[in-house]
Image: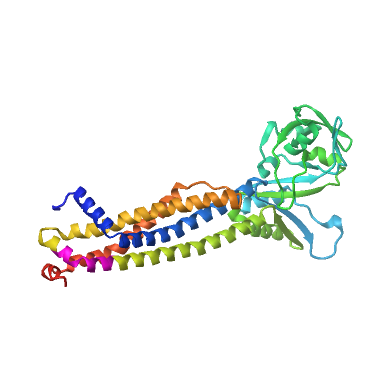
Amino acid sequence: MMALSPLDLFLMTFRELKGNWVRSGLTALGIFMGVAAVSATLNISAISNAQIQEKLEARDNPFLSLYIYPSSRVSFSEIPSINTEDITALEQNVSGISSISTVSSIYASSIRYQGQTVTEARVAGVSENYQQTTGRKIFQGRFFEPADFDQYKPVAIVDETLGEQLFQGEDPIGKGIYAGGTRFTVVGITETKQQYADQQPTGELWVTQNYGNALSGGFSFAQTLVSLNNLEDYEAVQTEIEAVLTGRYPNFEVGSYGNVEDLYLEQQQQRTSSIILNIVGLIALIIGGVGIANITVASVVERTREIGLRRAVGATDMEVILQFVLEVTLLSAVGGIAAIASIHFLSKIATTTLFVSPYTFQLRDAAISMGASLVVGIGASLLPALRVTRIDVVQALRGE
């Protein structure tokens, strides 16, 4: 049984820390610096991930646009187009694909509604699963139904940007608009997003691909879009797709480009930077731990007579060891909390004044930082504290 109650042990520890404030301050400072490095690393990583996610949300789902081109001089009519059999082969042989659809660019000099005219909007004929591929939400009305495709209905969907330009606050559902001299009835409003990094939204008008092909006389440029389940699979899916299509068209070259290739590269760079920062944070923690170990060793030597006296009057080895460990635990908690609060405050200021970026306090990251401070603090003090059990009581009382 321990001679001291937990409360008495805590009070004794507190008095010891208060009476040696320089040593206590240096220990807390070592913990503060190490935890601050870890907390800053985690915050930087979280801010970078939030920035990438924000950019992803501003664009269509991650997708690859596929194309086939000749390896030697051939006529345009001999260049194959990706067909339904190719799409089936891709779906069966390539993992990581979420959806495959096609979209055709349709020429229209202007889009008009009553007195409003828009000349820079994009007009596209889309397939039935185009919404699934792009991931765009329908805010009002509906997406195209199978009957719209089968019956070649002159219906259209406009995005928010085009809707604001044409209708200026009016409800667009059911209204008739003109694109290239053809009248379409608006059945839905979709969200506006960027397709590519360097492409600013100018407004979009979607019609069914069947009607779009008929409208253009079959001379429309069609893209095959393959959306990905995960941005992290970008390179792997791209390689697998090109391998499947190259096997089906051995005399042609197969290529692809994506709408998030820049974000994929940015994500990889951010991960590399995070690894480097994590290593720096770990080194800072180790340095802090070495400092704590040195201070604890000095404390054991300095308090040799006190330790001998306590053991002579009945204190157990465990009580004395626990006092040293409790001292460092309290200092680790103080230094860790101060570091986490300071880094949170600085992160908040940086993301609101120096540069605008999404940032929220992450309890998980704070728990990791706090756990690191306690592990390093307690671990660094444990071995020096164990020296207490090897101290001879008589020699300790003599101060040897």
Q: x%, y% of residue 170?
A: 76, 27
- Residue range in magenta is 296-308
Can the viewer see residue 65?
Answer: yes
Q: State left or right for residue 326 relative to residue 243.
A: left
Residue 299 sits inside the magenta stretch: yes
Q: Quadrant of the C terminus?
A: bottom left
Q: Which of 233 and 304 is in front in this view?
A: 304
Q: Residue at x 64, y 58 (%)?
A: 240
- Dividing the picture into quadrants, the one containing residue 397 is bottom left
In this picture, is 22 found above or below 116? below
Residue 288 sits inside the magenta stretch: no
Q: State left or right for residue 233 relative to residue 218.
A: left
Q: x%, y% of residue 211?
A: 81, 37
Q: Residue at x 62, y 54 (%)?
A: 94
Q: Is the magenta stretch mostly helix, strand or loop?
A: helix
Q: Residue at x 71, y 49 (%)?
A: 225
